[in-house]
Image (cartoon, grey):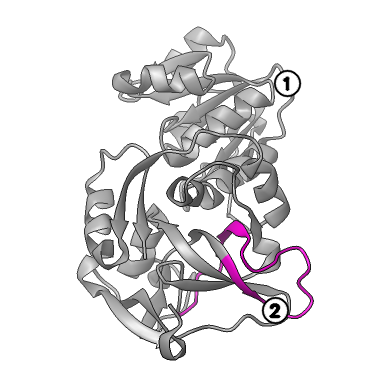
Amino acid sequence: MIAGEKMRAVVARGYGGPEVLESVTVALPEPGPGQVRIRVEAATVNPVDLVTRSGTLVEAGLMAAREYTGIGWDVAGVVDRVGAGVTAFAPGQRVIGLRDLLDVSLGAYAEYLVLDATAVAPAPPGASAAAAATLPLNGLTALQSLDLLDLAAGDTVLVTGATGAVGGFAVELAARRGLRVVAQAGAADEELARSLGAEWVVGRDASDLAADVRRLVPGGVDGALDTAGLGIRALAAVRSAGAYATVVGGSAPLPLRGIRVHQQWISADGVALAELAAMDLTLRVAETLPLERAAEAHDRLAAGGIRGRLVLVP
């Protein structure tokens, strides 16, 4: 829709609960040099959208307060226009992309989104737009976290929250790297964790996670990818001089016993995203909702219990 060079978008007006999400009509953004404009077909709802909307990131000093804040990081759609100097993409091409800037007035909850071409990749072959949109943020987070751990084939790794959106990709990618995966998951998700590549599964509600892991892997795992923000509980399952990475801000424990501790912060990477898109990974969509039901999607994500991601469709 390019009627009068306007488009619809959902933004946060101020900060607070889902009620601050507002549908607005704004000027159609134009791609600058090195950028592409994408006609959005699907935008994923992620936990970071909720903390952005709530004002938590403003309070933490990670972004400045503004009257209107753009929401949404993941996008799948069709290239609509390219800026000067862009040769890797052309109008009509199906793509996925990631917005990694926090402090913006427009996000992926919109009919069109402008991204740097370096943040965009061809869409996964054969995947629906909704499924493709679940890959950028969560897939890159898992990939970049595993890179930080720097483990070798045959090493053991604990993945907490192993059947969540990031955790599921982490298990799958770790297994494809030849790592032996201990997945922390609920009893109902054990089959899913094993289908993604986990060799062992430990209970999500275990009273002593480290003890359970060390019974399976004496001495402790070589590394832990903590997508659940368990901190010291996950660190205790790692052998001395091993590696630990968390994707939850503020949850990184002290580097006890010579363990390398990393806090992973996502960054857009079109090259790595293209590699992920070509891997035929497991893309999980819980449900698609129209863009105007963004507040409902936020409520449902906050309530928990969702398998896969909620996806908004303009």
Residue 29, which numbered label? none
Image label count = 2
The residues colored magenta run: 79-105
Say if mark 1 contacts mark 2, CB within 8 Å. Answer: no
Looking at the picture, tell me which residue is in the foreground, 212 or 21: 21
Q: Earlier in the sequence, mark 1 or mark 2?
A: 2
Residue where numbered disc 2 is placed: 83
Quadrant in the rendering for residue 25: bottom left
Quarter in which the N terminus is drawn: bottom left
121 falls in the magenta region: no
Task: Tell me what residue is drawn at x 38 percent, y 61 percent.
Answer: 49
The amino acid on which the numbered mark 1 sits, given as a three-letter code, is: Ala
Q: Secondary structure at mark 1?
A: loop
The amino acid on which the numbered mark 2 sits, given as a three-letter code, is: Gly
In the rendered structure, the answer to whether residue 143 lies left or right of residue 296 reads right
Q: CA distance from mark 1 to mark 2?
A: 42 Å
Task: Tell me what residue is drawn at x 66 percent, y 40 percent.
Answer: 278
The percent position of residue 262, horizontal first and vertical second, equals 61, 44
Looking at the picture, tell me which residue is in the foreground, 123 or 32: 123
Quadrant in the rendering for residue 243: top right
87 falls in the magenta region: yes
Task: Tell me what residue is drawn at x 43 percent, y 58 percent.
Answer: 42
Task: Tell me what residue is drawn at x 40 percent, y 53 percent.
Answer: 46
What is the chief secondary structure element of the magenta stretch? Answer: loop
Q: Secondary structure at mark 2?
A: loop
Q: Is residue 73 above or below residue 164?
A: below
The percent position of residue 66, horizontal first and vertical second, equals 40, 84
Residue where numbered disc 1 is placed: 153
Q: Residue furthest bottom?
A: 4
Q: Is residue 296 above or below residue 84?
A: above
Quarter in which the C terminus is drawn: bottom left
